[in-house]
Image: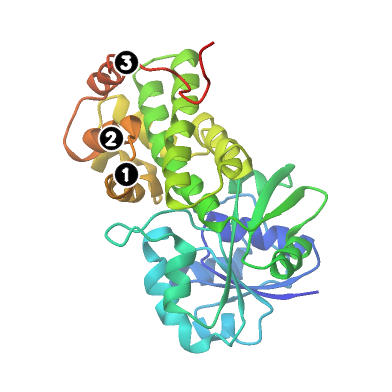
Amino acid sequence: MAEIGIIGAGSWGTALAWLLNNNGHKCRIYSALPDEIEMFKKYHENRDKLPGVVLFDKTDYTADLSAAIRDKDVIVMAVPSQFVRKTAAQMSEFVKDGQKIIDVAKGIEEGTCMTMSQIIKQEIPQADVSVLSGPSHAEEVGKGIPTTIVVGSKTKATAEYLQNVFMSDVFRVYISPDLLGMEVGAALKNVIALAAGCADGLGYGDNTKAALITRGIAEISRLGVAMGGNAATFAGLTGMGDLIVTCASMHSRNRRCGILIGQGKTLEEAQAEIKMVVEGVFSAKAAMELAQKYNVEMPIITEVNKVLFEGKNASDAVKDLMMRDKKIENPLIPWE
């Protein structure tokens, strides 16, 4: 049995607490919101963000950050991506040398263009930082619906340890050394999902969705490889797998936000209706910064930025994508 601290009591933190409890581990969940802690203590459930997923009685809840970190075998970082740096900085003084921290937030920081694991390592240099990523909606993980996912770590020993902690008969865990590729795929699929949602909101069909997913992974792969990620990662669970589920599911906040924008709502109106963090919005600008830095063409993500931040009509963005210069689908395939 492992002692696990979960930093963040949202839907993903709650679902992972359920999974880890079910695996026989002892979890302590931290929230900076006293009302949220009181709700957990009373109901053992996040009735606002993940209703119906009731945690074991042995789960602890605390608003004391140090109590969630000290003497823990593993720390799960489950705060939204835009709060990762601030939270990591607050955690640092309580984290011991070699402490295993596994991040489950997905995003690229605007301005620095750093991934979440890079931010955590910068703020907590003494930690052993890993990531958990893949096609995995909290709403399904918390119900024990079969899910496959990947742990990315710098060392195989850490990856295998975390694989054993998380793996169960409903949660299959693979391991990978390609943290960068995993995190680029995880962050940018949220931006493509906004585009897929816009297409749904406009009333377009399966043909459009398939095009956005396929060409979207091409964009993500181009950038990820240019940054130093492995091409094979983008064909796997944290690349194509995560992109498919995020573009197709109504559990996806990014897709739901895109649907509302496609129906004519502003970004602000869509975010207010979702009532949860839409991480693709925060990654979209960073994706453009990276595209410019690495001189990578990313037409879908470019159009998403124009729709989100420049007031461009979503249907006009689709038309402009369709009427781009003629291309060869895969320039690596030679003609005879």
* x then y, percent, for residue 270: 31, 38
Under circle 3, the secondary element is helix
Would you identify the image quadrant in which residue 118 lies?
A: bottom left
Eye-nearest disc, 2 or 1: 1
Residue 231 in sight here: yes
Q: Quadrant of the N terminus?
A: bottom right
Q: Which residue is mark 3?
A: 322
Report the residue at 31% width, 62% height from top.
112
Q: Which residue is mark 1?
A: 291
Q: Earlier in the sequence, mark 3 or mark 1?
A: 1
Would you identify the image quadrant in which residue 268 lies?
A: top left
* x then y, percent, for residue 141: 67, 48
Classify residue 127 as left or right of residue 220. Answer: right
Given contact means CB atoms under 8 Å apart, are the residues at marks 2 and 1 in contact? yes
- From the viewer's perspective, is residue 24 above or below residue 169? below
Q: Earlier in the sequence, mark 2 or mark 1?
A: 1
* x then y, percent, for residue 24: 81, 67
Residue 49 in sight here: no
The residue under label 3 is which amino acid type?
Met
